[in-house]
Amino acid sequence: MSKTLAQKVDWLFDAHRTEQGRQYTYGQVQRATGNRITASYVWKLRTGAMSNPGLSALEALASFFEVPLSYFADGGEYLEPSLSMMKTPVDEKVAREDAIEYVKQGTSKLPDDKLRAVVEVIEYLRTQEESPKR
């Protein structure tokens, strides 16, 4: 069974928190969206008092919580596991080591054309790192 819009909005508030670990306030959402959606409108969506919002309200929420607009579509809650992982703090040293190990193991099984593509991406990233910032 699909989640209601209210359940999805509630999940966003629970899953995406401030740097201090607190839930965002409705006022913070309003201010951060440039008043594209009011605090009371957000409250209505979260509590289910309003279940048929306009597109601009959903766009504002999607932008604020950094989720695709499709999250609000029927069945869009399937995105929640991947959206949760995106917000999890990453230990960059561990991530780098994991990526290197993955490339070492994975490239031995890649066909030559795919291996060339991996090398091209690495070279591109290296040039971006070395080029002066504008």
Image: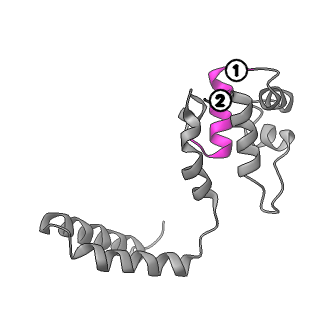
Quarter of the image with the N terminus in it: top right
Magenta highlight range: 51-67
Q: Main secondary structure of the magenta part?
A: helix
Q: Earlier in the sequence, mark 1 or mark 2?
A: 1
Residue 68 position, x and y percent, is 55, 39
Relative vertical location of residue 18 with respect to residue 6 in this rendering, above or below: below
Q: Quadrant of residue 73?
A: top right
Labels 1 & 2 near each other (Cβ < 8 A): yes
Residue under numbered circle 2 = 58
Residue 41 position, x and y percent, is 81, 26
Residue 113 position, x and y percent, is 14, 64
Residue under numbered circle 1 = 53
Give me the residue at 76% from left, 45% from top.
13
Give me the residue at 76% from left, 30% from top.
37
> Identity of the amino acid at label 1?
Pro
Give me the residue at 63% from left, 38% from top.
62
Return the residue nearer the eye: 103 or 40. 103
Q: Is residue 120 left or right of residue 40?
A: left
> Identity of the amino acid at label 2?
Leu
Q: Quick check: is 126 in the magenta stretch? A: no
Circle 2: element type: helix
Asked if one can make out residue 100 in the rendered structure from this viewpoint, the answer is yes
The residue at the far left in this view is 112
Q: Quadrant of residue 22?
A: bottom right
Relative vertical location of residue 105 with respect to residue 82 in this rendering, above or below: below
Tell me which colouring the rendered structure shows.
one colour
Could you classify mark 2 by the number of other residues whose Cα lies within 10 Å: few (under 14), some (14-19), or many (20 or more)?
A: many
Could you classify mark 1 by the number of other residues whose Cα lies within 10 Å: few (under 14), some (14-19), or many (20 or more)?
A: few
Give me the residue at 78% from left, 41% from top.
29
